[in-house]
Image (spheres, rainbow, N blue to C red):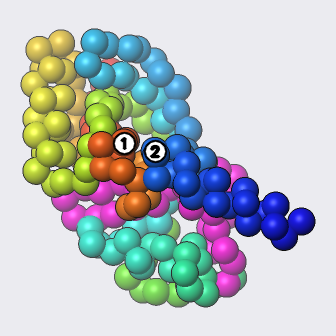
Amino acid sequence: EEGSRLRGGSKRAMGSVFGVVAEEAHAFTVVSQREKYEIRAYAAGAMIETDREGFMKLAKYIGVSAAPQNERGERIAMTTPVLTDKATMKFVLPAGIEPPAPTNPEVKVVQRPAEQAVVLTYYGGWNDDLAAQKKDELLAQVAADKVDVDAARWEWRRHNPPWTLPFLKKNEIYVPLLASQ
């Protein structure tokens, strides 16, 4: 049994090198498919948040490579994507859990309401300049399509671990629709 568990873990790790994502993803439904982007409806849910460079603070909260830094000392499954905006980084927490309070004061539990957004998917390495370029492309396209978005709230969403081959890394640019739509 131990050997089969290790082999299964090795297959999963090897798959992640090639862009396979096995983690739970932030739930959404596609409302509309456009030529260069989708309009999606996202479910409400809990997230953890810290400063933009705080990946390890979030990872420690869920218990990655350290004892979990939350009030229950509970390991929490990693999900996808990792969300980054101008100031913060967030992990989506698994659906249906009651998140324990963080023990690190730099980590907060936040609730995100259900909302609709335009989403552009692209593949490539993790590069702030490329993400900003893709955001500008998406905003130009939605403006041409007369779709009203809250451009100030855009996010860069990364779906793969760092060891995934760069050209296979799935990235998304997420921009919420204005509430009036």
**Helix, strand or loop status at disc 1:** helix
Does 98 appear in magenta? Answer: yes
Q: Which mark is residue 137?
A: none
Earlier sequence position, callout 2 versus callout 1: 2
Can I make out residue 116 in this image? yes
Q: Residue, x 64% and y 60% (percent of image)? A: 10
> Do the residues bearing badges 2 and 1 touch, measured as CB atoms within 8 Å?
yes
Q: Amino acid at mark 1?
A: Leu
Q: How many marks?
A: 2
Give x and y (percent) for residue 62: 57, 73
Per the image, the residue denoted by label 1 is 168
Give x and y (percent) for residue 135: 17, 38
At label 1, counting other C-alpha atoms closer than 10 Å, the crowd grade (few under 14, some 14-19, many 20 or more) is some
Front residue of this view, candidates 65 and 93: 65
Q: Quadrant of residue 163?
A: bottom left
Give x and y (percent) for residue 84: 30, 56
Q: Amino acid at mark 2?
A: Gly
Is 180 rendered above or below residue 51?
above
Does 175 appear in magenta? Answer: no
Q: Main secondary structure of the magenta part?
A: loop
Give x and y (percent) for residue 2: 84, 70
Tell me which segment is drawn in magenta.
73-101
Q: Is residue 115 left or right of residue 173?
A: right
Figure quadrant of the C terminus: top left
At label 2, counting other C-alpha atoms closer than 10 Å, the crowd grade (few under 14, some 14-19, many 20 or more) is many
Can I make out residue 156 in this image? no
Per the image, the residue denoted by label 2 is 19
Figure quadrant of the N terminus: bottom right
Q: Is residue 52 left or right of residue 169?
A: left
For the residues labelled 2 and 1, the Cα–Cα distance comes to 5 Å
